[in-house]
Structure formats: structure tokens, C-alpha cells
Amino acid sequence: MRVGEAGERELIRALLRVINRLNVNLMGYDDVSACSLGDGRALVVKTDSFVESADMLPGMLPEHVGRKLVVMNVSDFAAKGVRPLGMLISLAVPEDREVEYLVRLYEGAEEAALEYGFDILGGDTSRGEELVASGFLFGIQSEDKLVRRSGARVGDYVAVTGPFGSTAVAFSILLRGLEAPSERVKEEALKSVYEPHARLGEGVALAEAGLVTASIDSSDGLAASLHELAESSGVGILVESLPMSKCLLEFCEYHGINPVELALYGGGEEYELVVTVPPESWGEACRVVEGVGGHLHLIGRVVEGRGVRIVLGREVVDVERRGWEHFRGWG
């Protein structure tokens, strides 16, 4: 089977069967890797890459590339409740790329790193046929504070840290050529993909307080993330409400598009957290998140069974497992 036929998820599982011993990697199949330091703490690491041919959007400046590289790595730390200590960046660069472009890329990355409280310590450079920037993030967290995607329990609430849909609008404008209903909607949408934000404060606060049973970020799209959390935990998820951005609602009304469809399947790279919270901890979880300037939106609950379903009016329908997957794209 070729990589394009297998897709990213099956490729990862095939590779992990070779290298992953659960007594070494505390996280198993999750968004980060971790190994015990022997004193109750774990060294947590994460690597993610920006590949020009796959990730570059029209209009992206080098500063945007640098910021996105940092945010895509930090977001997975946020979902696991880990505060980063430092980052390395490796670049593969075509020989004809201007030095100034790469300086500006690093400036964007450094600004984002400082925003999240850590430094970029160095990295590596080599020649490549296209720009490939890889981040390597590391941090330390107590083993008992690490939040996995596999801990959701029947009866838990399902919540997210923000509304969905702005990135879907941006992709519709940039990649499908659809018109924005106003300049304000266009600016809001494009900012969501050019200047993304990770929910690090919210994720760390929830983990430190021990208030969530499972967590994942929504970078691959909300539907895909809900399915991944449900499958990893061996449960079902019922979505009963869906917070959607004003940007999405205005855009969909203008074009006659179903906003739920775009919010579930058309976005990704929103970097919101999807968490499960025991009902008795819900009030405290909301207060903890509000204490760091965030907000939790209750969207549903964990139920018996498998898969993800959503309440639409008087109907309950299946949520398809669709979202971003490398080697396959959106689907």
C-alpha cells in the first residue's frame, strides 16, 4: 500500500508499531511524546512541520509562516497541559530564497514564542527543493498532570475553548475564490489563518487543576478531532450545540451555505481545544478558564456507544469523519 492510499493516520500507526513501547512513551498514540524522568515528572516533546507546497496559503508573509510554525506545535502542548521550555527550528531552504525572507520568518516565530513564554534556542539549516520548516518543542510536566485524548468517560461534558468557522471562511475565500460579504468579514477570516493563536493558558490551567479527563486540539478540523477523541476513549459523543463565529454566520448567509457543515468539516487550523469535563467539575473548569482570560463553550456530552452524532432540530444525525489528513488532504 502506498502512502497516498494509507493516509496519515494509518502511516503513523504502522510506524508506531515499530518504535512505540508504551512503557517508554507515556502518551502512546497521542499528539505529543513523553518519557519519564524518574522523579514523577516527564520530558514532553513535539515536532511538527510547515511544508511550503502543502501549507502555504495565498498572501502569507514570512512572519505568518514563522508564527504558524510555533502555534501548530504549541497547540498540541496546550491540549496536553504542558508549558513549553524551548524550541528548535530546522529549515530546508532552496538556494535562491532571499536571506531576508528567512530572517522575517524567524522574527515571526520569535514573537510567537515570546508570547507563549519560551525561547527559540537554535536549530539546523540545509538545502531543499522547497521551504520546509520543522519545529521541535520540549517541556516538563508532572506525569499525573498529562492529559491524554483517551480518558473521556460516559457522562462527561464535551466543551471547546472558542467558536468555529472563521478559518473555513478564509479557506473559502483564498482557495475557492468565494467573495466575502464585507471587508470586515474578510479581515477577520484572513487573520484567523495568518495570525493563529494556541490556547496554551487554558490548557495548562485545566491540566494543573485536574479538571479534564481528555483533551485534543482542533487543528485537523472539529469533526475529525471529535472522532479521534471518541475513538481513543472508546466512547461516543453527542453534539447538542455548536458555537460558530459571526464571521462564519455572515458568510454563510451571504452565500446560502449551511454554516454547520462548514464549522464541522470546512475549517481546521483553528487550534481550539476540545475537552471532556466531569459534570461535577464543570463550574470550576469554567472559572479556571475565565481566570486566564478564556471561555469554555459546552457543546455536548460523552455517551455510550461509538462515533459522533449531532442534534439538528428534531433529528440526530451522524457526524462524518472528515477533516484534514496529510497525503489525502480534506476528506
Image (spheres, rainbow, N blue to C red):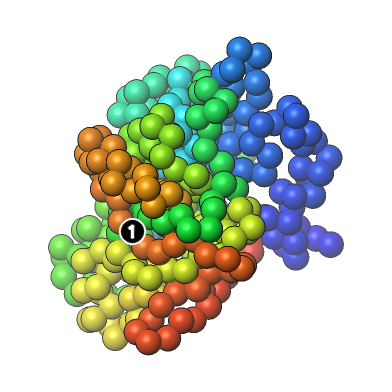
Image quarter for residue 44? top right
- Against 97, residue 271 (above or below) is below
Q: Measured from the top left, where is residue 40 in percent x and y?
A: 59, 17
Seen in the image, is 182 located left or right of residue 145?
A: left
- Against 256, residue 65 (above or below) is above
Between 7 and 78, which is closer to the camera in this rendering? 78
- Which residue is labeled 1 in the image? 298
Q: Measured from the top left, where is residue 324 in percent x and y?
A: 54, 61
> From the image, which quarter does the C terminus lie in?
bottom right
Residue in view at x 30 percent, y 64 percent: 243
Q: Can residue 325 be seen in this view?
A: no
> From the image, which quarter does the N terminus lie in?
bottom right
Circle 1: residue type: Leu
- Against 61, residue 116 (above or below) is above
Q: Measured from the top left, where is residue 42 in percent x and y?
A: 59, 22
| Neighbours of disc 1 within 10 Å: few (<14), some (14-19), many (20+) | many
Between 236 and 129, which is closer to the camera in this rendering? 236
- Against 266, residue 17 (above or below) is above
Q: Residue pushed farthest top?
A: 39
Residue in view at x 51 percent, y 46 percent: 214
Q: Can residue 32 be seen in this view?
A: yes
Residue in view at x 34 percent, y 84 percent: 313
Secondary structure found at label 1: strand
